[in-house]
Image (cartoon, rainbow, N blue to C red):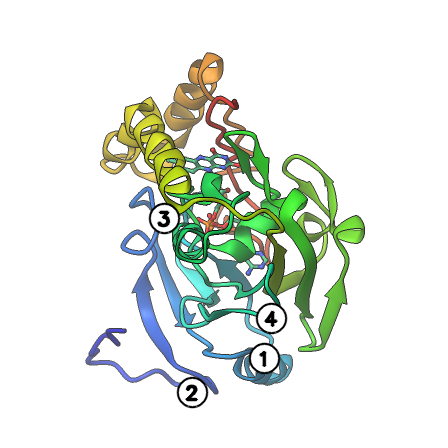
């Protein structure tokens, strides 16, 4: 990871790897957003807990991002800490059919791990933009698969740094509806269950088909169209998304252009989540 070299030293030192004065536009899928005071990269649940405990004293606004494919950042400065779990990407099999994934693991890497291990039931994750933690939080779905259907359990961390184990029944309430969307909890890891075995050629064939579908999809070109726009033009983006309703459903929630716009925010100092729900047509 590249840590920016800056001429100005931060006045606070976070208890994990971090960057400061970071352009969020440079980190988000849509290439939109202002600067964040800190972007923290905890490398383990323990480091994440340390950061959250540290922040109990400093009370900075907190936000969490995955790959930024379902977030629109405001152009305003975010005066707190954006947490990225991009250093928490470990995954390993804890039994023949149960895969433990840290929340920062990329959906595509999980699909590739399943291919390597000859496990079916997860090819639909291939090229679904995002990390598994956010994918669980959103209960993402595509090509007939839904993350709730392959999840055995979810490890979350409260804003106070306490680890919790949650069952799928507690978390999933429907497509793009989870308890995590209302609660300030961070998904730290997910236990996925893939009981089906499959021939690698068949799994690969299915994955290639999904890739082709995604490549053809008009939303693949969407970021290029949006990048030149700033958040002041977000109504245009919003309208464009709604116009595409016949192909994909796009919902932008909340007040997009207020100074406090950020994704899931865990502090009382800031506003509501702003996220879009993008769906490819389902099979
Ligand atoms: C081209 C394109 C195609 C897409 N196709 C589909 C599709 O077919 N089906 C579908 O369901 N979705 C689709 N999406 C949406 C997107 O893939 C999913 O919503 C994905 O889960 C978002 O992952 P992310 O890592 O980019 O999350 P982000 O956009 O970074 O974050 C999404 C939300 O999750 C929160 N979050 C992030 N990490 C965590 C965590 N560890 N714990 C708690 N909260 C967290 C963020 O604060 C934010 O509110 C598509 C998006 C794009 C851009």
- The CA distance from mark 1 to mark 2 is 11 Å
Left or right? Give the position of 83 relative to 167: left
Q: Which residue is mark 1?
A: 55
Q: Which mark sits nearer the N-terminus, 1 or 4?
A: 1
- The CA distance from mark 1 to mark 3 is 24 Å
Quick one: SS at disc 1? Answer: helix
Task: Look at discs 1 and 4 and give the one toward the viewer.
Answer: 4
Left or right? Give the position of 221 relative to 131: left
Numbered badge on residue 94: 4
Q: Position of residue 67 (x, y in %)?
A: 40, 53
Disc 3: CA contacts within 10 A as few (<14), some (14-19) or many (>=20): many
- The CA distance from mark 1 to mark 4 is 33 Å
Q: Which residue is mark 3?
A: 75
Say which of 71 and 95 sits in front. 95
Disc 2: CA contacts within 10 A as few (<14), some (14-19) or many (>=20): few
Task: Look at discs 4 and 2 and give the one toward the viewer.
Answer: 4
Q: Which mark sits nearer the N-terminus, 1 or 3?
A: 1
Q: Position of residue 42 (x, y in %)?
A: 47, 77
Q: Which mark sits nearer the N-terminus, 4 or 3?
A: 3
- The CA distance from mark 4 to mark 2 is 36 Å
| Residue for point 47% across, 19% down | 242
| Residue for point 67% across, 66% down | 156
Q: Quarter holding the N terminus?
A: bottom left
Task: Look at discs 4 and 3 and give the one toward the viewer.
Answer: 4
Numbered badge on residue 210: none
- Residues at badges 1 and 4 in contact (C-beta under 8 Å)? no
Q: Which mark sits nearer the N-terminus, 1 or 2?
A: 2
- Residues at badges 4 and 2 in contact (C-beta under 8 Å)? no
Disc 1: CA contacts within 10 A as few (<14), some (14-19) or many (>=20): some
Quick one: SS at disc 4? Answer: loop
Say which of 46 and 3 sits in front. 46
Q: Position of residue 66 (x, y in %)?
A: 46, 56
């Amino acid at each position: 990871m590249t840590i920016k070299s800056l001429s100005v030293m931060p006045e606070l030192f976070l208890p994990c790897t971090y960057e400061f004065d970071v352009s969020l536009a440079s980190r988000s899928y849509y290439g939109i957003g202002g600067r964040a005071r800190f972007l923290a990269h905890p490398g383990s649940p323990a480091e994440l807990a340390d950061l959250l405990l540290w922040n109990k004293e400093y009370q900075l606004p907190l936000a969490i991002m995955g790959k930024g494919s379902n977030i629109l950042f405001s152009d305003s400065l975010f005066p707190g800490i954006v947490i990225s779990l991009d250093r928490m990407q470990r995954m390993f099999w804890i039994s023949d059919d149960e895969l433990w994934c840290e929340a920062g693991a990329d959906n595509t890497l999980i699909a590739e791990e399943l291919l390597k291990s000859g496990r079916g039931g997860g090819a639909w994750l291939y090229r679904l933009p995002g990390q598994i933690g956010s994918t669980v939080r959103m209960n993402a779905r595509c090509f007939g698969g839904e993350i709730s259907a392959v999840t055995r359990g979810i490890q979350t961390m409260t804003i106070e740094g306490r680890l919790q184990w949650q069952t799928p029944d507690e978390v999933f309430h429907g497509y793009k509806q989870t308890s995590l969307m209302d609660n300030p909890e961070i998904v730290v890891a997910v236990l996925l269950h893939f009981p089906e075995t499959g021939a690698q050629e068949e799994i690969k064939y299915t994955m290639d088909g999904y890739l082709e579908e995604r490549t053809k999809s008009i939303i693949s070109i969407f970021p290029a169209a949006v990048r030149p726009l700033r958040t002041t033009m977000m109504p245009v983006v919003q309208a464009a998304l709604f116009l595409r309703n016949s192909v994909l459903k796009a919902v932008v929630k909340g007040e997009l252009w207020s100074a406090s716009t950020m994704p899931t925010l865990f502090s009382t100092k800031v506003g509501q989540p702003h996220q879009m729900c993008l769906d490819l047509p389902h099979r």
